[in-house]
Image (cartoon, grey):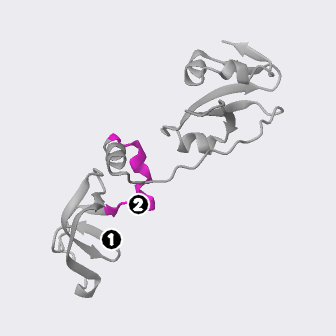
Amino acid sequence: MSVRIPQNQITTNKYTTGKEFVYEKTYKEYQGFYYEVNGKIFAGSEFSVNAPSLLRMGSDKINILKDNPETLAYANASNSILYKQKDLTSIPLDTFKGGTKYLAKKLNSNPIRIIFISEEDYNNNIKNTSYSLTALYYHSEWGFNIEEQNKKDIPEIDIFLADFITADS
């Protein structure tokens, strides 16, 4: 089966010397000919259904690159900012409702700042290298159940939660 795309939707024979695109699957920097089809960018000088797709450096789609060590090394070496990291927002603790509560500690900050965060922020930032995150169980009658893993994640958790009744496991 062949794919037909109108010629007026393909822009061919473009060239980059680097520092402009990365491969979508490997996030390695791309240098060479590329073409565009309907706003999407592909490696190669002419249209091919097997051509690897490219992402423009600095685009919103590259936020996932923050977990890739090669990308961080490249960004540091080239003084590039490939993504913006926003601070997590503190939420109030509902002491009347039990369940899993999520905490975040901003790393390399003075003074130490530990906050309660939403489950969504926890899940979206689990690999964020600017924060140490932990999840622990809260019971409305007897307080927090602090486990060893919570203490490993945030060593100051005992001090932060000192105003609450806690039960050690």
Q: Which residues are magenta?
A: 55-69
Along the viewing direction, whichever of 22 and 167 lies nearer the viewer? 22
User: Residue 138, how many percent across, how many down?
Assistant: 73, 26
Left or right of residue 21, residue 117 in this image: right
Mark 1 vs mark 2, CA separation in Å? 15 Å
The disc at residue 95 is none
Residue kind at label 1, given as amino acid type: Lys
Pointer 2: residues within 10 angstroms few (<14), some, or many (20+)?
A: some
Residue kind at label 2, given as amino acid type: Gly
The image quarter in which residue 147 lies: top right
Residue at 36% in and 45% down: 76
Name the residue carrying label 2: 58
Left or right of residue 138, residue 28 in this image: left
* Residue 57: in magenta span: yes
Along the viewing direction, whichever of 105 and 52 lies nearer the viewer? 105
Is 119 located above or below residue 47 in the figure?
above
The disc at residue 40 is 1
Is 123 located above or below residue 155 in the figure?
below
Residue at 80% in and 22% down: 164
